[in-house]
Image (cartoon, rainbow, N blue to C red):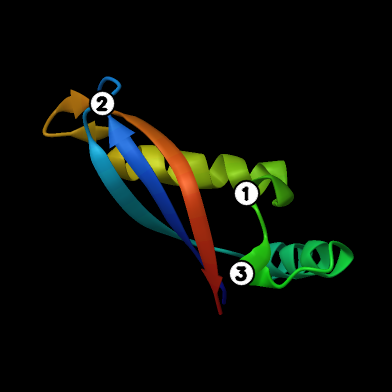
Amino acid sequence: MATINIYGSGYQSPGDGGDIESTMDLTDEEFEEIKSIASELDKELDELDYDDLPSDIRDRMEQTLDDEWGYVDGESWNTMVNGFSISE
């Protein structure tokens, strides 16, 4: 099973907050789809850009960060994906 390590930032207002990380498992089908996209783009997995990923996977990545970091100490935080890496 492959995993996406998600790197992002969490903040309440511009200028505050910090770096956050989360992990998301990929199904075999999702991983095969990403490998196929990389092949079509003539890129290695670690060369893919966020926009290269299918929108449903990008949505899950954003939701994963929000689920884990959207509330800190009872306060609502904004989250944003800044990057990712894929590991098998």
Identify the element where label 1 is drawn: helix
User: Residue 9 appears in which quarter of the rendering?
Assistant: top left
Tell me the residue that label 1 is attached to. Answer: 50
Identify the element where label 3 is drawn: helix
Residue visible at 69% across and 41% down? 55
Q: Position of residue 71 (x, y in %)?
A: 24, 32
Residue visible at 84% across and 70% down? 39
Residues under labels 1 and 3: Cα distance?
A: 11 Å
Foreground label between 2 and 1: 2
Counting residues from the start of the chain, the first of labels 2 and 1 encountered is: 2
Tell me the residue that label 3 is attached to. Answer: 46
Residue visible at 49% across and 40% down? 62
Residues under labels 2 and 1: Cα distance?
A: 23 Å
Location of the N terminus by quadrant is bottom right
Foreground label between 3 and 2: 2
- Residue 29 visible in the displayed image: yes
- Residue 70 visible in the displayed image: no
User: Residue 10 appears in which quarter of the rendering?
Assistant: top left
Left or right placement of residue 46 versus residue 36 in this view: left
Front-lying residue, 66 or 16:
16
Q: Position of residue 20 (x, y in %)?
A: 30, 48
Q: Residue furthest left?
A: 73
Residue visible at 68% across and 45% down? 51
Tell me the residue that label 2 is attached to. Answer: 15
Q: Residue furthest right?
A: 40
Residues under labels 3 and 2: Cα distance?
A: 29 Å
Left or right placement of residue 88 versus residue 48 in this view: left
Location of the C terminus by quadrant is bottom right
Give above or below for 19 relative to 46: above
